[in-house]
Image: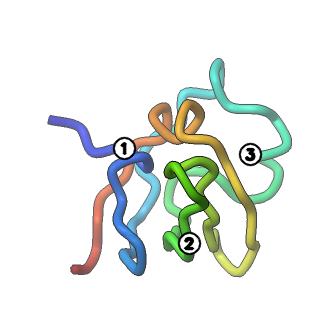
Amino acid sequence: MQVTLADIKRGQQAIITDVSSIHIPLKLLEMGCLPGNLVELVQVAPFADPMYLNINGTHLAIRKETAIHILIDITNG
């Protein structure tokens, strides 16, 4: 089973392993949403959408429908 960014829990950190660039806006790639970068789930909005992330020091929010296209390896908890 592949783990995606949509599966991460609050406070967990992970390494991005693959990004399906067809479904990911270019702006997210420019902001560091790339394989090899560390990502942490900071907070989740009501109804679990959007997700507020810290990716290599950059804070951004993405929708779950986008997060399911980002594969990760969870590094802690």
Which secondary structure lies at badge 1? Answer: loop
Would you say 48 lies left or right of 11 here? right
Residue under the image location 77 percent in, 32 percent down: 25
The residue singled out by tag 3 in the image is: 29
Question: Residue type at mark 3?
Answer: Leu
Would you say 35 lies left or right of 27 here? left
**43 vs 14, nearest the viewer:** 43
**27 vs 66, nearest the viewer:** 66
Nearest to the eye among marks 1 and 3: give it.
Answer: 1
Residue 43 is marked as: 2
**66 vs 19, nearest the viewer:** 66
Residue 59 is marked as: none
Dot 2: few (<14), some (14–19), or many (≥20) neighbours within 10 Å? some
> Earlier along the polypeptide chain: callout 1 or callout 3?
1
Question: Residue type at mark 2?
Answer: Gln
Residue under the image location 74 percent in, 63 percent down: 60
Which secondary structure lies at badge 3? Answer: helix
Q: Residue 67 appears at what percent x and percent y?
A: 52, 41
The residue singled out by tag 1 in the image is: 4
